[in-house]
Amino acid sequence: QVQLVESGGGLVQAGGSLRLSCAASGTTFNNMGWYRQAPGQQRELVATITWGGYTNYADSAKGRFTISRDAAKNTVYLQMNSLKPEDTAVYYCNADSVIRQRQYNYWGQGTQVTVSS
């Protein structure tokens, strides 16, 4: 059974840092990433990382967030620095895999990040 389990969310003051982790299990994953959803808004991309380590960031995350991946542990991380109140959201881990030539997409349950001003 495929599982994505996020951790590391919490409450932090503006300017602070948090590190999110997503432990994945159940299959081999290709691309992994982080998305977020603020109240009343659509889920949006934060950052992604490919199996080969190529990264992509939303403009809002560039220069402040860093995505990384430990392939041996099947874990993806999101280091978030210089946090702003507008970063407040539920952060979701995402991963995809290919099984018998079919692509599957998976989501974690989400972890709340709250940044106070």
Image (spheres, rainbow, N blue to C red):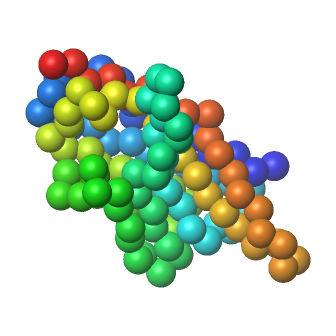
- Answer left or right for 36 relative to 13: right
**Relative to 58, is 18 above or below?**
above
Residue at the right extreme?
100
Q: 49 and 19: which one is in front?
A: 49
Q: Is residue 59 left or right of residue 73?
A: left
Q: Position of residue 95 (x, y in %)?
A: 61, 58
Residue 78: x and y in percent read 36, 50
The quadrant the C terminus occupies is: top left
Q: Does residue 67 appear to the left or right of 21 in the view shown?
A: left
x, y percentage for residue 21?
44, 45
Residue 114 found in image quarter: top left
Indicate whether 88 appears above or below 32.
Answer: above
Taking depth in this image into account, of 41 and 45 the one nearest to the observer is 41
Relative vertical location of residue 33 with respect to residue 37 in this rendering, above or below: below
Question: Which residue is pictured at 40% across the width and 51% down the height?
Answer: 46
Q: How many numbered discs, if any?
A: 0
Q: Residue 108's quadrant in the figure? A: top right
Residue at point 23%, 27% (across, down): 85
**Residue 6 on image: x %, y %:** 52, 39
Instruction: Examine the rendered structure and indicate whether residue 79 appears above or below residue 13.
Output: below
Query: Is residue 52 in view?
Result: yes
Q: Nearer the viewer, residue 6 or 49?
A: 49
Does any portion of residue 67 appear in the rendered image?
no
Residue in the image at 27% along x and 31% along y: 86
